[in-house]
Image (tube, rainbow, N blue to C red):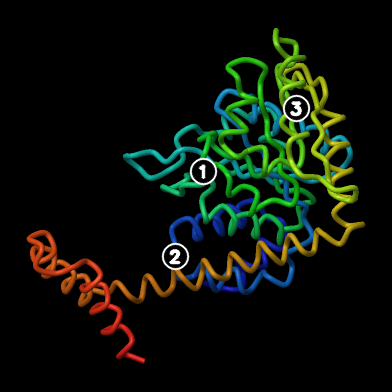
Amino acid sequence: MNSDLAGKILNKDKRGIARGITIIENSNSDSAELLKKIYSNIGRAYRIGITGPPGAGKSTLTNQLTKYYRKKGKTVGIIAVDPTSPYTGGALLGDRVRMSEIGQDEGVFIRSMATRGSLGGLSKKAIDAADIIDAAGYDFVILETVGVGQSELDIAQAADTTIVVLVPESGDAVQAMKAGLMEIADFFVLNKSDRPGAKQAVNAIKTILMMCDHDASSWMPNIIQTIASENDGIEETAAEIDRHREYLINMGNLKKRREHRTRLRIKEIVEDKIRTELWNDVREKSLNSSLEKVVLGNLSPYHIADEILENFRKQF
């Protein structure tokens, strides 16, 4: 990995940014070195997470929100996390096609990424990719996740402000409560609010929110009604992002959120490194040779696990 690529990223060179993300996606040995080189430039971008059930209009909202920020002279990086193709391991939906309107804008960078089996609907690599876009000097990074319901919740660990997008029909308000989305939303966008049932959906969300514990100083999630396809409610959505950002800064919570996020991420990196080192060819072979004994009931899985860990400890 050479310093030239890091330099291109810091100079907002789109090909350099794309190349850097590709290195990260492929878990190339150069990826950690690249992130180390650019890390002193990370932390300036504001990260917005957009999540919610499939078909709620997340991509349309992202598209319109990006156009709004561009009119304000702000630059935007978008990471659209798609389901993984079972054949190629790559992103399946291709949001760059869906966002073709803004894709040619010099102030916008869009990348579709595969979940690669990540249960939370947000690839671990997507957070590294957000770091690259951040280091490149973009004002906002929008992380739009695949709508997978209950396991969607790790978006809250990656964003400064998390938006949950719902629609009036299909009982989404109740489903959101079941999925835990109520807990991660900094505010809600009820999209397609021109459809029947919008008022009832807003009332249902408000009722659920009133059941949650809130003290006088805590943030109370708002509900913004939009028709994203008609650019209706986008300015209000951007204003609510600003309002939440100001709240976090004034309460000292933005720094706390980022520290918490970093703590979890470092733990995850350490665990991944240990897992990779632990499962070398020797220990994989040892595991495979013990499987029959476990299946036949001669040895407990815990016994085998203890043996493998003891063997691992001996190398230190």
Nearest to the eye among marks 2 and 3: give it. 3
Q: Nearer the viewer, residue 133 or 217?
A: 217
Q: Which residue is mark 1?
A: 121
Query: In front: 269, or 4?
Result: 269
Q: Is residue 47 left or right of residue 240?
A: left
Q: For the residue labelled by badge 1, is the local secondary structure a helix, a strand or a loop?
A: loop
At 20% from the left and 77% from the top, the residue drawn is 282
Q: Position of residue 164 (x, y in %)?
A: 68, 35
The residue carrying pointer 2 sits among few (fewer than 14), some (14 to 19) or many (20 or more) residues within 10 Å by Cα, namely few
Q: What is the secondary structure assignment of the residue under circle 3? A: helix
As drawn, 55 above or below 102 = above
Mark 1 residue type:
Gly
Q: Residue at x 11, y 59 (%)?
A: 295
User: Which residue is under mark 2?
Assistant: 28
Q: Quadrant of residue 152?
A: top right
| Residue 307 located left or right of residue 210 | left
**Helix, strand, or loop for circle 2?**
loop
Vertical order, 57 against 66 (above or below): above
Task: Please give the label number shown on residue 207.
Answer: 3
Q: CA distance from mark 1 to mark 3?
A: 27 Å
Amino acid, disc 3: Thr
From the top left corner, tell me how far across and down residue 241 is, in percent.
83, 41
